[in-house]
Image (spheres, rainbow, N blue to C red):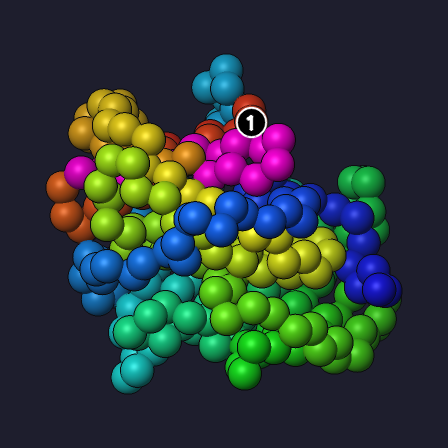
Amino acid sequence: MKRWLPGLALLLSICLALVACGPTVPVITVAQIPWADGEITSYAVQDSQGTELGTLNMTIRREGDLYLMTSFTMMGNTTDEITIAMNADDLKPTSETRTIHMGSGGPVPGGTYDIIADFSDNQVIIEADLPGNDHQEPYVFNIPADSYANDQVWYLFRTLPFEEGYAGRYTNIVLWTQFQKPAVTVTVVGNETVETPAGIFDCHKLELSVLSLTIYFWYGVEAPHYLVKYQKGDTILLLTEHP
């Protein structure tokens, strides 16, 4: 398979190796839609020592039969803007656009990377414009029926039942920097109190695991179950503002 984007992984990308989940784990359940229309949340991105690395701002709003999720990440001289359209009933993705502005002096050429993906009928069609007027023609990939886009998981996990011990699986569609479709599991492993710039929250702790990689998400126990904290290795997100 042709590598259609250069080998760059942003800190916030959840790029996972292919792995199969156990057959006894059911596909994840969209049990609730807890957010208000037009909700805006903001996060600080920091390392494990508390050094601020950047910011993340997210919004979600209803448009007819769809939810539109947008996120904007700024880290140093790099920005990453994403818009995902999802079916309002089951949150299955219908389209994703992503624009990444890379500063010069990094491990890959600076410039603008535009990615467009359309999801339908167990397929995703992806095309991209890279720096230097390099247009990547559309590629068609087959995906399983349980697929969700990697970049929508912030909201997807807010819809889970949040019962301790709950576990679900799904196929995670990764578009950057290379197309991947790993099968992953997410489990509610307990409750913890988390202190953030936005306050102190009682949270459900979720564990996402695949092969040797483990990622943690903390969601507020009280509705609308804001994402309060995220940790992947030394990279941490902390809630700074919410409605």
Which residue is pictured at 80% across the width and 64% down the height? 4
- Does residue 218 belong to the magenta stretch? yes
Query: In which quadrant of the rendered view does residue 2 lie?
Result: bottom right
**Residue 218: image x %, image y %?**
32, 35
Q: Is residue 78 visible?
A: no
> Which residue lies most toward the front here?
24
Query: In which quadrant of the rendered view does residue 5 lie?
Result: bottom right
**Residue 113: image x %, image y %?**
71, 62
Query: In which quadrant of the rendered view does residue 166 lie?
Result: top left
Q: Main secondary structure of the magenta part?
A: strand
**Residue 94: image x %, image y %?**
48, 77
Please state which amino acid type lies under the numbered disc 1.
Gly
Left/right placement of residue 222 relative to residue 130 reads: left
- Does residue 5 belong to the magenta stretch? no
Q: Name the residue carrying label 1.
A: 233
Which residue is pictured at 24% across the width and 28% down the height? 191
Which residue is pictured at 67% across the width and 45% down the height? 17
- Reply above or below: 85 against 183: below
- Reply above or below: 37 against 211: below
Foreground: 122 or 68?
122
**Which quarter of the figure is the N terminus placed in?**
bottom right
Left/right placement of residue 25 relative to residue 64 reads: right
User: Which element type, helix, strand or loop, lies under badge 1?
Assistant: loop
Residue extent of the magenta highlight = 208-221
